[in-house]
Image (spheres, rainbow, N blue to C red):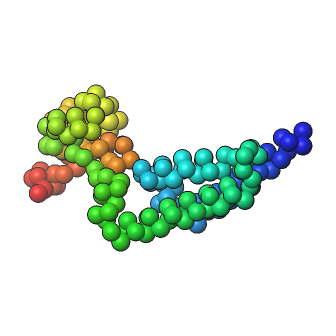
Amino acid sequence: MYFLSLIAARTGIVFLTLLLLFRVLGKRQIGQMNIYDLAMIMAIANGVQNAMTNGNGNLTPGMVSSGTLIVLGALMTKLFVKLPRLEQRMVGTPTLLVNHGHWMDAAMRREKVTEEEVLAAMRQHGIGDISDVDIAMLEIDGAISIVPKSVVTHKLGKRLK
């Protein structure tokens, strides 16, 4: 029973520490995960696993490891803000999948996105036909954004350039 209580206490300490550190990083880190955020989360999970379960390590190395990873994540975010081209190289850029109602087949093949996936995103936006889509973008977080043609038209019905 003591062993289980120790694991519960260690897990609570790790959780509260990570919660505090993520809160310090700000809302962007939590709300908009990208590939390096995911890598950081996976590394943190591995780093604190032994600290929580009393495995080969102890609590202090797990906390130092997770704290270091979070600080590195914050530094990467600041670096990406100052050097957007570095972020584009590391994280990627959105990819155009549909342009003015036409499939961008080469981009879809390169990104391994099927027409059915785009059609599903269109249905989520209440759009039933590809001709009603101005653009569909594969965002860096993997979501497909849809901009219907009605959004890019002027009040007088003229298309905005």
Q: Residue furthest front?
A: 56
Q: Looking at this view, is 76 or 55 the one in front?
A: 55
- Residue drawn at 27 percent across, 39 percent down: 111
Q: Is residue 35 something one can see in this rendering?
A: yes
Q: Residue furthest top?
A: 116
- Residue drawn at 50 percent across, 61 percent down: 73
Above or below 29: residue 104:
above
Q: Is residue 25 something one can see in this rendering?
A: no
The quadrant of the picture occupied by the C terminus is bottom left
Residue 80 in the figure: left or right of residue 19: left
Q: Position of residue 87 (x, y in %)?
A: 34, 60
Q: Position of residue 118 (x, y in %)?
A: 28, 34
Task: Count the labels in the image.
Answer: 0
Q: Position of residue 58 (x, y in %)?
A: 75, 53
Image quadrant where residue 106 sits: top left
Above or below 29: residue 148:
above
The quadrant of the picture occupied by the N terminus is top right
Residue 130 in the figure: left or right of residue 45: left
Residue 105 in the figure: left or right of residue 84: left
- Residue drawn at 74 percent across, 55 percent down: 59
Q: Looking at this view, is 69 or 131 the one in front?
A: 69
Above or below 76: residue 41:
above
- Residue drawn at 32 percent across, 39 percent down: 125
Image quadrant where residue 156 sits: bottom left
Q: Position of residue 83 (x, y in %)?
A: 33, 69
